[in-house]
Amino acid sequence: MYELLARDRAALSTLLDAAATYSAGVVGGIDSRTVAIPPRAFDHHAISQKGDGCQAVLERFRTEIAPFLSASAGPRYLGFVTGGATPAAVVGDWLATVFDQNVATRLDGSLAVQVERSTVAMLRQLFRLPECFDGSFVSGATMSNFVGLVLAREWAGRIYGIRVSEQGVAGLPPLSLLAATPHSSVTKALSMMGAGRETWHKIPSVPGREAMDVPELARRLAGDHQPHVVVASAGTLNTGDFDDFAALASLKQRYRFWLHVDAAFGGFASLSPSLDSLLSGWECADSICVDLHKWLNVPYDSAVTFTRHPHLQVDVFRNAAPYFGHALEDPDPVHLTPENSRRWRALPAWFTLAAYGSDGYREIVERSCLLARSLGDKIDASNLFELLAPVRLNVVCFALREPHLQNQFIAAVRDSGSTFLTPTVLCGKGAVRAAFSNWRTTSADLDTIWESLKMAAEQIVQA
């Protein structure tokens, strides 16, 4: 064995202790850490011939890299609907690495796949979905939406007598995807699957909202008899708006279409009695995307695709390698998603669900939404900002009243290190979005965030 590798093997316990002590210090101080920093170059080191050993590299990371990482796991990072990682999720993620399971198959007798299935069942219960929904772990919302749309195409092919998974798309009419304000990952998925971004046909939104105009959708569905794919939003990117799922459920009784629900973060509204009406009827969906590294607060990368058509999953994703076995009635994960090799994503989710239960997550969701509404109220009452949409869930969409200074404002907020927001466009107007989803965020953090926003705006306007 190579000398440095043998030395680190002998010292592994000490190395893990050092990493644990350092990690605890980082997590313990994350509330006071600079949230975001101005961009900077990284001093690249070419690979050395002999190597330096783990302890030296840990020290290099601590001094050369860590000080310049954002506090994206902290309470004042409001960009991208980014959750952090609960204590239990961190422990689960660490152990997922330690045990390094092959979760593609059960051939080795490991319980890992069964734990994953148990975790899916817990999530189904958390979101109050019917038992007919099966779930599979994937990397994030993009891959979850991709899986749902690939299944939709397979479904559409069957209507035309074509098994796309076996025969390809030759002879299959272009997929017709109908949506009002889909997330960019939906159109990216269309590109990846070869359908093309132009497959999306925009359905008008309800005036003043991002939600789909369902009567307009009904007119489109009644106009021809081809199978359609409808993508509905449970929490739109900019304003956290919801499509009318009860109305969509009624349409499904009259027209033939596959309903895919992008509930990347909005699915968590089901946890709160004051919010669950937003999802009334969503169980009529054929496939659902939920992104766990958002409001479940598990580490990147983790999401789930739910579907009531698991047989289509097997047809699309089954793996023919003999060492993976056959896709039987009870297929292994390797036959259900694009990946053969992946980490044990379910373990951090299992840890945190078991540790904090549905009540713990309900509290996180309701607190996040309360803080978002509070920020919205502050913005609405200020002469510096304009609130661009009602705060329906956890996203606050607003703009500086001096729109030409918007980019400078966003950069100034970032460079202050107190919080981080992301730019967007709403109805053709430049905007800013703040998304609350971190388990740590409290009213004290909101005070810091608000003061930072006011200070940055005043400085930019007065400059």
Image (spheres, helix red, strand yellow):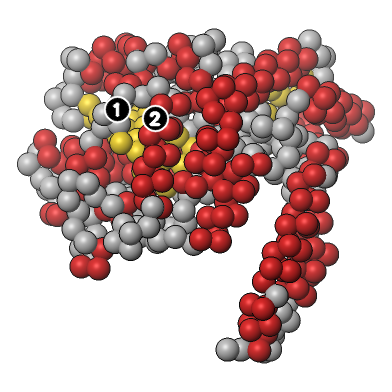
x and y, in percent, of residue 138 in the image: 42, 47
Residue type at mark 2 is Arg
Residue highlighted by disc 1: 131
105 over 259 or under it: above or below: below
Spot occupied by residue 340 in the image (x, y as percentages of width and height): 35, 60
Residue 326: image x %, image y %? 18, 58
Instruction: Choose between 228 and 91: the one closer to the eye.
Output: 91
Name which residue lies at 78% across and 15% down.
378
Q: Is residue 201 visible?
A: no
Measured Cα–Cα span from mark 2 to mark 1: 8 Å
Q: Which residue is mark 2?
A: 124
- Tell me if 453 is positioned left or right of 119 in this view: right
Q: Nearer the viewer, residue 263 or 431?
A: 263
Please determine whether, in this image, residue 41 is positioned above or below residue 366: below
What's under tag 1, amino acid-wise? Glu
Residue 53, quarter of picture: bottom right
Nearest to N terminus: mark 2 or mark 1: 2
- Name the element at disc 2: helix
The residue located at (48%, 33%) in the rendering is 264
Please tell me how many numbered marks the rendered image carries: 2
Q: Nearer the viewer, residue 18 or 218?
A: 18
- Contact? badges 2 and 1 (CB < 8 Å): yes
Position in image of residue 48 (x %, y %): 69, 85
On screen, residue 269 above or below 356: above
Would residue 390 be seen by someone viewing this image from the given angle? yes
Question: Which quadrant would residue 216 be assigned to in this image?
Answer: top left
Q: Is residue 185 left or right of residue 90?
A: left
Q: Secondary structure at mark 1?
A: loop
| Residue pictured at 51% horizontal, 61% vertical | 99
